[in-house]
Amino acid sequence: MFCMRRSKKWHSRIASIVSFAILLASKSACMAATDPGMDLRYDITFDSASALAGKKFHWAAMPVNIQYNSCTVTGCSASIENSVLRGIDFWQNNAAIFGEIQTQFAASGDIAVTYKVSPGGNVIASCGATVGQYTSGGYVLMRPLTLTIYTNFSGFSVTDAQYQFVSAHEMGHCLGLWSHSPQEGDLMYAYLTNNIAYSARDVNTLRYLYSQASDVGSYPPQSGSNLSSDIKVIGTIESTPLLNH
Ligand SMILES: [Zn+2]
């Protein structure tokens, strides 16, 4: 069982005691994690028709590093970027709720955020990854995962508030919530909204996911020797697109 909450390094004795208490509370909460049932959460497995279908993924270490690449394509604006950055920060800003998740911006990332001009259609954003497999059989997602935000749509527009929802939602995919929720009001609902609040079902689902062993690792591994000869690329995976209605 994994419990990913990580306490900061505090240097005063009092802070250490507080930190230890938080760690104990975190561990007991983690150990108590049981499946709340499908009425109170949604699916946590890959829903794509791929080698990973039915498996689950979450990060093995915190914080998750986010490499943010500024928007330079047609349709960019400062307000879009500000909205996307707020959406990315949704998870860190709600760390008191989603305690298993810590994120930070970094020069090289576990997740890379990029912007592209919409190729047409109604796909607004996605999270994708190259999939690798060890000769021993285990699967990995190659770092960085790619969080793509599209601009310059044909026939419709996306508001700043919707962009904030979009980036928080896609971060949910990249953090391991790979499936969509069928219920409007959940952050991982399959259709575009401007609802940026988390629901009890979102909290239940993420906590349950991070209380389970991950079936899929990430590559390069957090530590250890270079295993490049032991691994091969077998394809790619992409979250089911978030759609405009
Ligand atoms: Zn989605």
Image (tube, rainbow, N blue to C red):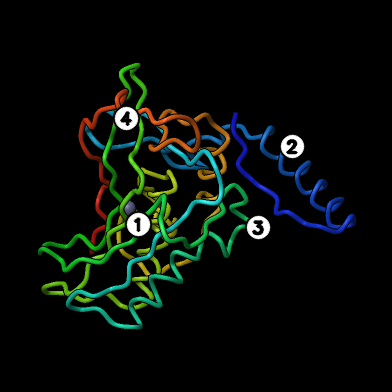
Judge depth for marks 2 and 1 and give the one in front. Answer: 1
Residue placed most toward the observer, 55 or 108: 108
Judge depth for marks 4 and 3 and give the one in front. Answer: 4
Q: Which mark is residue 228?
A: 4
Secondary-structure class at tag 2: helix
Secondary-structure class at tag 1: strand
Circle 1 residue:
112
Judge depth for marks 1 and 4 and give the one in front. Answer: 4
Whole-angstrom CA distance, mark 4 to mark 3, is 38 Å
Whole-angstrom CA distance, mark 1 to mark 4, is 21 Å
Residue 226 drawn above or below residue 115: above
Whole-angstrom CA distance, mark 2 to mark 1, is 33 Å
Residue extending farthest to the right is: 14
Circle 3 residue:
96
Q: Specify which label sits upstream in the sequence, 3 or 1.
A: 3
Give me the residue at 42% from left, 71% from top: 85
Q: Position of residue 8 (x, y in %)?
A: 70, 54
Secondary-structure class at tag 3: loop
Residue extending farthest to the top is: 136
Residue 164 drawn above or below residue 139: below
Q: Which of the image's four quarters has the C terminus?
A: bottom left
Q: In the rendered structure, which amino acid carries the disc numbered 1?
A: Ala
Q: Specify which label sits upstream in the sequence, 2 or 1.
A: 2
Q: Specify which label sits upstream in the sequence, 2 or 4.
A: 2
Q: Which of the image's four quarters has the N terminus?
A: top right
Circle 2 residue:
28
